């Protein structure tokens, strides 16, 4: 077998190493694959084409890495691999990012000293903004704009000419590039404690918490690393080691050979994993018959023997089959593969509302109303088909590239046409479920329960968290005994009109909420048209268009006024004539 150093250059090897790190490999994994993949490809007939060699390396490295990660039950750090690839190509160019890293070194040197210290603490020491403020003796309000400004300048260095709006992988490339550059230099903050983590690839961290890790979590103020899912290599002293040479380290995926580990489901070719939950896994797949990419939701093998979960999975397929609406993810097919049920759905290229919240923070009232109206539109159709969703939350709302919101994940949906009886309590997600889904004596479950879910989702968009915060199920249930804090008491700058709509959706008694999804949509339409006309107060009458609302209503109102004026004139004329006669 040829030696890797004899078949590709050092810059190509380092470029492959960076690419694998970017896709989620640990330094050790990336080093092992950077050694193995060229050896595997050296005998291929197209290997001699030097112009396409790096592209071939990246493609094969990605296949082996993603297959190995799936075999270990890990997820790639991207929702959209295509968008991640576009970011990588903009950064790497022909030399695997060497030119951009040289420019990044210069860009770091041009920053003001305070910005340099902030970048060092954030990206080398993994400190939070509050921790940076304590180290530098500055309030966190001053750290945030300083850090954002420095990151924006450095992002422009890595992606010249591109908009500074963050895409899937741009911040991740900035993080990895800064780490590689910063680790070349002596640590200017040796007194700051290092986050200590177990050595080895991420699969070795599967057990809950080792005693040493539990102790570190309890005592180390810098333990809570925002990049904890991207393990660093640490020495026995706890110091982060620089990226290892490409030819060092064991091969963690020696038994993995590309995408052959992915299942073939019916005639669909599986290209990778999108997400994984307690009940099922969602794959990205390709339908060769129709020539399109799709999403396939498949029940986990470990849950196939549970008759309740299997019935719930079948109910989801049955419910989705009846739905056909622009704001509901569409189902194309369903069936069983080797005893495991699956559902084939439209592939939505985008992100969930929860991803949007995590990436951007709380959203404006106008944006919350736009997404709330889309959900109300979806529910009008869903409820007409006698289906209840019962689990509306930001994670179950996808936003495509055209900013269209689509309701998804009908795993807890109830078919009221076939089973109209009272459903069990405890169905849904704590924090987003209404009282009637949490308590037995809180009233019947119905369309008003989904309206509560829309209100809870809009509340989260406005404030950054659900109405009763986050916590365990017991904590949420305890808080639900108290009134919901209005969004304006949680966050600043919230329009009273959108707050009134949200609070009406979240009324404790179902009869105090909007009577239907149509009434909710009408209220949100009115807010988008004229916020000043939205009745304030959670218990106000339903905000539906009245006689004077809308273009048709205005004409009718003025017609009635004109008619009353004319009638008054006629009556006055008759009265005068009677008096004079």
Image (cartoon, rainbow, N blue to C red):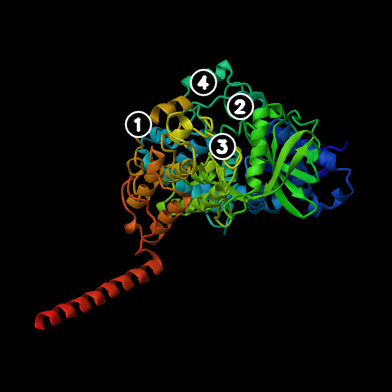
Mark 2 = which residue?
A: 234
On the image, which quarter does residue 232 sit in?
top right
Q: Earlier in the sequence, mark 4 or mark 3?
A: 3
For the C terminus, the quadrant is bottom left
Q: Is residue 283 left or right of residue 170?
A: right
Comparing marks 2 and 3, which lies closer to the viewer? 2
Q: Earlier in the sequence, mark 1 or mark 4?
A: 4
Q: Is mark 4 on a helix, strand or loop?
A: helix
Comparing marks 2 and 1, which lies closer to the viewer? 1
Q: Which of marks 2 and 3 is nearer the N terminus?
A: 3
Q: Which of 393 and 306 is in front in this view?
A: 306
What whole-number distance in Å separates the C-alpha atoms at marks 4 and 2?
15 Å
Mark 3 = which residue?
A: 185
Q: Is residue 472 visible?
A: no
Instruction: In the rendered view, tell whether residue 233 sits above or below residue 172.
Output: above
Q: Residue 482 carries which label?
A: 1
Instruction: In the rendered view, tell whether residue 226 sits above or below residue 16.
Output: above
């Amino acid at each position: 077998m040829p030696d890797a150093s004899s078949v590709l250059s050092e810059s190509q090897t380092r470029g492959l190493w960076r690419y694998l790190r970017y896709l989620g490999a640990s330094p050790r994994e990336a080093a092992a694959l950077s050694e193995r993949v060229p050896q595997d490809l050296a005998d291929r007939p197209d290997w001699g084409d030097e112009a396409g060699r790096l592209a071939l390396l990246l493609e094969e490295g990605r296949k082996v890495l993603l297959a190995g990660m799936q075999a270990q039950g890990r997820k790639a750090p991207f929702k959209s691999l295509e968008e991640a690839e576009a970011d990588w190509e903009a950064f790497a160019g022909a030399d695997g990012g060497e030119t951009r890293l040289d420019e990044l070194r210069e860009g770091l040197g041009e920053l003001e000293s305070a910005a340099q210290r902030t970048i060092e603490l954030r990206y080398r020491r993994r400190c939070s903004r509050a921790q940076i403020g304590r180290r530098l003796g500055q309030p966190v309000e001053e750290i945030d704009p300083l850090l954002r400004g420095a990151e924006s300048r450095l992002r422009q260095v890595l992606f010249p000419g591109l908009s500074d709006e963050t895409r899937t992988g741009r911040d991740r490339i900035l993080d990895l590039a800064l780490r590689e550059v910063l680790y070349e230099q002596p640590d200017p903050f040796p007194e700051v404690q290092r986050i200590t983590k177990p050595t080895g690839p991420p699969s070795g961290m599967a057990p809950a918490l080792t005693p040493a890790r539990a102790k570190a979590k309890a005592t180390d103020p810098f333990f809570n690393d925002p990049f904890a899912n991207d393990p660093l290599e640490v020495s026995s002293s706890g110091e982060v080691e620089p990226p290892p040479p490409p030819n060092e380290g064991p091969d963690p995926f020696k038994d993995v050979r590309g995408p052959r580990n992915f299942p073939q489901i019916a005639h669909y070719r599986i290209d990778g994993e999108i997400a994984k939950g307690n009940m099922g896994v969602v794959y990205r797949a390709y339908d060769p018959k129709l020539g399109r990419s799709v999403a396939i939701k498949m029940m986990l093998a470990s849950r196939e023997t549970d008759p309740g979960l299997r019935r719930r999975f079948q109910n989801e397929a049955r419910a989705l089959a009846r739905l056909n609406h622009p704001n509901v993810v569409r189902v194309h097919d369903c069936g069983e593969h080797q005893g495991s049920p699956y559902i084939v759905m439209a592939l939505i290229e985008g992100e969930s509302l929860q991803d949007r919240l995590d990436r951007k923070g709380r959203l404006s009232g106008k944006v919350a109303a736009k997404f709330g109206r889309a959900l109300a539109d979806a529910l009008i159709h869903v409820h007409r088909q006698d289906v209840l969703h019962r689990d509306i939350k930001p994670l179950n709302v996808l936003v495509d590239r055209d900013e269209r919101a689509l309701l998804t994940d009908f795993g807890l949906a109830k078919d009221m046409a076939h089973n109209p009886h009272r459903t069990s309590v405890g169905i849904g997600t704590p924090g987003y479920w209404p009282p009637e889904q949490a308590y037995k004596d809180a009233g019947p479950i119905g369309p008003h329960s989904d309206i509560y879910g829309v209100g809870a989702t809009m509340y989260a968009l406005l404030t950054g968290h659900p109405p009763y915060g986050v916590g365990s199920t017991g904590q949420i249930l305890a808080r639900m005994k108290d009134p919901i804090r209005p969004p304006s008491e949680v966050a600043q700058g919230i329009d009273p009109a959108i707050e009134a709509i949200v609070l009406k959706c979240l009324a404790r008694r179902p009869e105090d909420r909007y009577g239907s999804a149509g009434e909710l949509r009408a209220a949100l339409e009115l807010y988008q048209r004229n916020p000043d006309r939205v009745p304030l107060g959670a218990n106000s009458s339903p905000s539906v268009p009245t006689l004077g609302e809308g273009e048709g209503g205005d004409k009718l109102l003025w017609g009635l006024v004109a008619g009353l004026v004319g009638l008054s004139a006629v009556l006055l004329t008759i009265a005068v004539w009677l008096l004079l006669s």
